[in-house]
Each structure stands twice: as structure tokens, then as C-alpha cells.
Amino acid sequence: MRISTELAKAINDQISYEASSTQAYVAIGSWCERTGYNGAATFFFEQAAEENTHMLKFVHYLNNAGAEAIIPATEKPKGNFDSLESTFQAGLKSEQTVTKLINNLVEIAEREKDRATYSFLQWFVSEQIEEETLFGTILQKFEIIGRDKLAIYQIDQSLASIRSEIMAKGDSQQPPAN
Ligand code: FEO
């Protein structure tokens, strides 16, 4: 196995968090859908798919490193919310937690001089910057546009396509990837 037991365990913990995030975002999307926030529902179902992709990246990495990826059971996620804004507050908080967990994985890889895992984790470091930016930008909309019914309607309408718009803007500010 070309990864330490400690790092394999920490990555398995991350697999568990990504699996919980997947379910949490499906639950938020489901609440949005039944509440009539169709733009937000699209956004959160896409976010859930992204989290599932993150989980699989870690699963493949561990299995290919000769360790065992452990597929976890997940707890029932929160299924009801007070407002559209509160769903994005929950999302931002979760992404901030993920950033800390990824940074912790990077620290272990650094300490162990595991350059392959360190390099693998860099994609997640960048991804977390994007995810926090995305949720932060959406939360700003409530400050700028407002929280009355028309404002919420406009925000919801913008959410179905906001991911690609913000990511495209981010890409144009980055040097091209090689
Ligand atoms: Fe998998 Fe949103 O972090």
C-alpha cells in the first residue's frame, strides 16, 4: 500500500463527509423543489452530483493506492428549512468545514512527505475556493437584491444557471491551466 494507515483513515473520513454532503444537498434540493424554488432545486441537485463526484475521486484514489475505500452509511440529513437564504447559509457552513478537512489532509500529506497524495489534494484545495466563492456570492444576492417576495423570486430564477456563470467568470480571471 503506497499510502500510510493514518492518511488512508483520514481520506476514508473525507469519503464519509462527501457522502453526507451529497445527501444533505439532495435533501435541500428536495425542500426547494417542494417549496416552489425551482432554480435553487436545480442548483442543489447539481451540487449533490458534484459532491458525489468528490466522494468517488477519493474512493478511486484510495483503491488505486492499494488501500480500501470504505463506503459509509450516512445519517438522515436535515430536511426542512426556514427560508431560501438559510439553505445557502447551511451550504456555506458545510463548505467551510470541508475546506478545513481538506487542509488537514494536506497537512498530513506534507508531514508524511507523501508527494503523490499532496499533489492529488491540490485539485480539492482549488475546488474549495470555488465552492466557498459560489455560496458567498449567492448569499450576497440577498443583501443586494433583498428579501421580499419579488427579490426572492428573482434570486431563485437566477440560481439555475449561476454555477456556470460564476465559474466562467472565475476561469477568465485565472491563468490558463496547462
Ligand atoms: Fe466536496 Fe463541496 O466539497
Image (cartoon, rainbow, N blue to C red):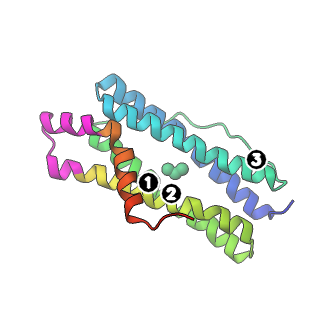
Query: In the drawing, does residue 141 fall left or right of residue 91?
Result: left
What distance separates the C-alpha of mark 1 from that of mark 3? 25 Å
Q: Does the residue labelled 2 lie within 8 Å of ligand 1?
A: yes
Residue 21 visible to the viewer: no
Query: In the drawing, does residue 66 fall left or right of residue 21?
Result: right
Residue 65 visible to the viewer: yes
Q: In this view, does 22 lie above or below 89?
A: above
Q: Is mark 1 on a helix, strand or loop?
A: helix
What distance separates the C-alpha of mark 3 from that of mark 2? 21 Å
Mark 3: which amino acid?
Ala
Residue at the spot 68% in from the left edge and 75% down from the top edge: 110
For disc 1, the marked residue is 131
- Marks 1 and 3, the one that precedes in the sequence: 3
Please provide percent x and percent y for residue 171. Answer: 42, 58
Instruction: Decide: few, some or many residues near mark 3? Use Cα within 10 Å; few <14, some 14-19, many ≥20.
Output: many
Residue 152 belongs to the span the image colors magenta:
yes
For disc 3, the marked residue is 69
User: What stretch of residues is rendered in magenta?
Assistant: 141-158
Q: Is mark 3 on a helix, strand or loop?
A: loop
Q: Residue furthest top?
A: 34
Q: Does the residue labelled 1 lie within 8 Å of ligand 1?
A: yes
Residue 129 belongs to the span the image colors magenta:
no
Contact, mark 2 vs mark 1 (Cβ under 8 Å): yes
Residue 127, numbered circle: 2
Mark 1: which amino acid?
Glu
Residue at the spot 33% in from the left edge and 55% down from the top edge: 136
